Image (cartoon, rainbow, N blue to C red):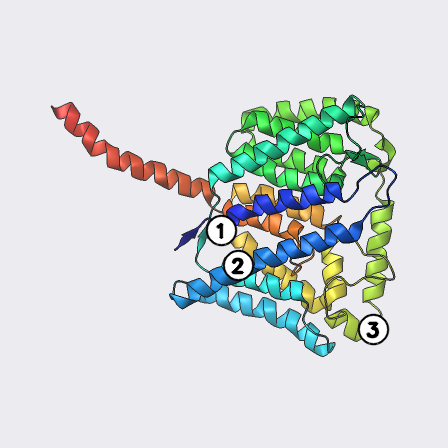
Amino acid sequence: MKNTKILSLVPLIAVASAVVGFFSIRTGAEFVNYSFRADFNLYLTLLFSSILLLFLAYQLLFNRLTYYFSHLILLFSIVFFSITSYVINGRGVNLAYVQFLILLCIIFSNINFHFDKKIVNRVINYFVVINVLAAAHYLLALKLIVIPVAVFDSFRGLAFDRVELSLILSCFLCWSLYHKNYIVSAAICFLIVLSESRSGILCVLIISLLHFPARFRLSLVVLICLVVPILLGLSSRSEALFMISQRVDLVLIGLKAGAVDLKSIIFGAGGLYTSVGSSTPHNNLIQTFLNFGLSGILSYLLFLIFILKKLSRDNLAILSVFLIFGLSHQDLEVFSFTVKNITWLGFFMAMSGLAHKENMKDLELANFQLPKYAYKKRL
């Protein structure tokens, strides 16, 4: 059990969240039902964390869970600083925090994670095809369905909004480009650009540059420079795409709120989802500062150190998705067990060292076949 395909559930979880988000807005005139979507995602994460807990218990029971000493020290340090914030503020530990700790105990072990390729490809292909049909419905201004495929002034496809759609598709793009599924990758890029998500469009550029061969990168940049202005000209929110003042204001509000007194600066509020009035900073670094103060920032940096130690070129693309979306959107704060966090981290762990493993398999196969071939030649 050094290898597991348990993370193959992650793409299914992401798509399930998107579909429920889509149905939470039933008509164009209806008020958005946030509670329906939030409740479903809560049950979804509870189900997944329960599966992880059973997996963890099974590994411990049969003594199959091993750790490097350095990983244990790092895990203890990350947990210590955030738990200290809870204790100092006299607050109970959030359930999402406990769920994330279960995941940390698994991913910090020596178990290797990978996806079942058939399952992931099938999920991605179906999701992309359905969204391409939704895009045709949107572009042709058809009125075949009551539920809108565009909300908040932009295309959202089969998802709650453009952010959820573009985040999921950005993770799918990393996988598809790595496996050279260029038709699916092109469709994903088209859908992300159509969603008019700034974070998504930036991810398309970075992921493409990381995965395309060096000889094609200049041509890719030129193509993007030609196509993007044309698409922006047709965009319904072209002005908003270049405006970041609202995001900056939210970050400044978070910084000011976290610097009220020394206790807040060092230990924060002692819990997840800390808000200032009705506002959240839409920035996972500032959100972590509000939650756990400088001790939380230290935990955040230690967590990134662990992630960076597993970094490969394939991981770099997934890490860029987390950094880009995390610095401009909510629900990606450290220690928060949400569908968004599970999605990017699941893809990161499953693709960790993927190229190396596949090369090793090819090498083993070649070594196995070589003597047989040589024997035939001698005959």
Q: Position of residue 173 (x, y in %)?
A: 60, 35
CA gap, disc 3 to disc 2? Answer: 39 Å
Mark 2 element type: helix
In front: 191, or 140? 140
In the image, what residue occupies the spot 39% across and 62% down? 64
Number of the label disc, if any, that sits on residue 6: 1
Q: Give the amino acid at mark 3.
A: Asp
Count the marks: 3
Which structural element holds mark 1?
helix
Q: Give the labeled residue for mark 3.
A: 261
Measuring 72% from the left and 31% from the top, which residue is drawn there? 193
Q: Secondary structure at mark 3?
A: loop
On-image quarter of the N terminus: bottom left
Are the residues tagged 1 and 2 within 8 Å (C-beta)?
yes
The amino acid pointed to by label 1 is Ile
CB of mark 3 within 8 Å of CB of mark 2? no
Q: How far apart in space, not on screen, are marks 1 and 2 (Cα)? A: 8 Å
Query: Disc 2 marks which amino acid?
Result: Leu
Residue 211, visible in the rendered structure: yes
Q: Nearer the viewer, residue 356 or 37?
A: 37
Picture residue at 52% right of the left edge, 54% below the top:
309
> Which disc, if any, is residue 20?
none
Q: Which residue is mark 2?
A: 52
10 Å neighbourhood of mark 1: few (<14), some, or many (≥20)?
some
* Residue 282 in view, yes or no: no
Left or right position of 362 against 263: left
